[in-house]
Amino acid sequence: MSIVQENASKVWNRLREAKRVLIGTHLNPDGDALGSALAMQRVLTSVGIEAEVICHHAAPRNLRFLPQVENLSPVPRMEGHDLGLVLDLDSLDRLGSTRPYLEACPFMIVVDHHVPMDQPGDLRLVDTTASATAAILTEFLLEVGADIDASTALCLLTGIVTDTGSFRFRNSDARSLHLAAALLERGADINLVSDEIFGRKPLAATRLLGHVLEHMVLEADERICWAFLSRADFDACGARDEDTEGFVNELLAIESVEIAALFRESKAGVARVSLRSRQGYDVAQVAQQFGGGGHRNAAGLNLEGDLKGKIADVVSALNQCLASSP
Ligand SMILES: [Mn+2]
């Protein structure tokens, strides 16, 4: 029996006691964040519990196909929530401006698959071996026999497809494929999901990728590759931060590269950083040195202040990570 199956009925019973649930997820929501949140809203609503989803940022363009994503709001529409359900994060900082609303709930359940950091929540359903939070939720909902209709299945499949990179990343395992198969059996359209998430992007995104490939830096015998995108680069291409989805994987795809990093200036003096690595190199530990987090082979962090100096610090930590790994 998995960790998820063992704890499923406890979490389900606690959820069923609630009357009004506030569902929250992380800043810059991805397919796993929004797919998980919207799926749980549907499931709770189907058993007569009021539920709404809040998120600091709006849905990125490539997730606008998700059912009911238009109801996403940065502030709650209802009052008096008796339960907060926090999905796909392990540090409440990642809730951004929605944090106080979720912290105000008298009880909090956290469902997540990241390396534990702050371990918030009164009840936690956490499995770091799961490929996605949506995979944990799928296993959970199957275990308790909850109703998974085709739209709920589509949301959950979006989470698994996103976090496994369409079953290409290291976290793609038999379990994620079994769970995805169960969702396909319930009517989720995997071709729609793959096409919306990976098969269509704005022209500005491809132009910006061109800029990254032209200006990327290779070091440590071409085993580290990193690139920086300034505000001016985004403006020159008419691109937005969400358009950089997947860029860092292009850097890691270079055959000599073991560790890749993408730095992007989100506003003057503030940068978001995505780290990726091949097996054997733990970039989550590098992210944690700078107040970030994530998974062994896919992590992230934020930088503020003197960006040039801070970027040099991160690159130097990546060099150390490379040198100290067996
Ligand atoms: Mn996730």
Image (tube, rainbow, N blue to C red):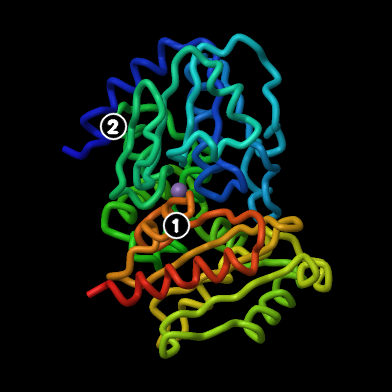
- The yes-or-no answer for disc 2 within 8 Å of ligand 1 is no
Residue drawn at the location 41% of the way across and 14% of the way down: 16
**Where on the picture, by quarter, is residue 207?**
bottom right
Residue drawn at the location 73% of the way across and 68% of the way down: 230
Question: On the picture, is 231 further left or further right than 226?
Answer: right
Decide: few, some or many residues near mark 2? Use Cα within 10 Å; few <14, some 14-19, many ≥20. Answer: some
Sequence-first disc among 1 and 2: 2
Location of mark 2 (residue): 143
Decide: few, some or many residues near mark 1? Use Cα within 10 Å; few <14, some 14-19, many ≥20. Answer: many
Residue type beneath disc 2: Glu
Residue 143, position as x, y percentages in the image:
28, 32
* Quadrant (top left, top right, bottom left, bottom right) of the N terminus: top left
**How far apart, in angstroms, are the residues tagged by discs 1 and 2?**
34 Å
Residue drawn at the location 41% of the way across and 84% of the way down: 223
Location of mark 1 (residue): 287
The residue closer to the viewer here, 152 or 197, is 197
Q: Is residue 163 above or below residue 27?
A: below
Residue 100, position as x, y percentages in the image:
60, 23
